[in-house]
Image: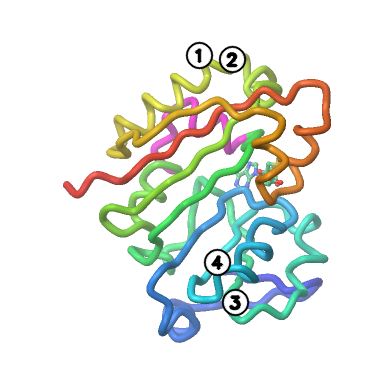
Amino acid sequence: METIRGRQSREMNAMDLRDLLAGYETISLDLGTGDGRFVCKNAEQNTGTFFIGIDSCRENLRVNSQRKLPNALFVIANAQSLPRELGGLVSCVSINFPWGSLIEGLLNNDARLLDGLARATRPRAMMDVSLNADALASAGWDLDSGANQIEWVLNAAGWQTRSRSDLTARDLREIPTTWAKRLAFGRNPRATRLALRKSSL
Ligand SMILES: C[S@@+](CC[C@H](N)C(=O)[O-])C[C@H]1O[C@@H](n2cnc3c(N)ncnc32)[C@H](O)[C@@H]1O
């Protein structure tokens, strides 16, 4: 898989990845990580967890991927073809404010995305998905029906809902991602969060 640090990219194979992750019990994957702020913040605060940020757009990752954090890694990949090297390693997935082909994949039950997530994660893995009204509107859905559709798709793919909640502007301000901050101070801060767990079957 292609990892990135600043302007440099490097291929990493499954053995290199396992060496890097050795000693970390919890591996967290942030899919559609954007500029990687969420990964860096969490890696600083939770040094016993390894954080992997994935995005298809390398430009946004130039700055934060240069940070020298021992428990963070950035990967350039499309969510519809997640790296095989991740197979069975991931214990938590976050998808914060997806848009474009990432939100389309969730809405349209894209098997490449869902199978990739199933392959990358451990049994009983956790998943948090935060959805905002404007991104769903761009895909042709309102917030409630779009969140219902994504919840249904994930449930059908074996991710059981643990909780679902509406996020207020104050909640958004507490989420350490660039997009959450933009939404919190923007004109349409409406958002919903789904917390799910992979069923053991
Ligand atoms: C609205 S931004 C949110 C970024 C970040 N999670 C945040 O909260 O600040 C959506 C991100 O999803 C990424 N994205 C969209 N489609 C993707 C795909 N198919 N695979 C990987 N990343 C994708 C975009 O490149 C963008 O960085």
Question: Which residue is most to the front?
Answer: 170
- Earlier along the polypeptide chain: callout 1 or callout 4? 4
Image quarter where ligand 1 lies: top right
Whole-percent x, y for residue 96 in the image: 60, 42
**SS class of the residue under badge 3?**
strand
Alpha carbons under labels 4 and 2: distance apart: 31 Å
Alpha carbons under labels 3 and 2: distance apart: 38 Å
Whole-percent x, y for residue 143 in the image: 58, 17
Q: Main secondary structure of the magenta part?
A: helix
- Earlier along the polypeptide chain: callout 4 or callout 2? 4
- Number of residues whose C-alpha sits closer than 10 Å to that of mark 4, classed few (under 14), some (14–19) or many (20 or more): many
Alpha carbons under labels 2 and 1: distance apart: 6 Å
Does the beta carbon of the residue at mark 4 sit less than 8 Å from ligand 1? no
Of the residues shown, which amino acid type is indicated by label 2? Trp
> Does residue 152 appear left or right of residue 194 in this picture?
left
> Does residue 34 appear left or right of residue 63 in this picture?
left
On whether residue 103 falls in the magenta region, the answer is: yes
- Identify the residue position indicated by label 1 in the image: 145
**Quadrant of res 27:** bottom left
Relative to 39, does residue 156 appear above or below in the rendering? above
- Identify the residue position indicated by label 3 in the image: 11
Q: Nearer the viewer, residue 169 or 122?
A: 169
User: Residue 51 shows which numbered tag?
Assistant: 4
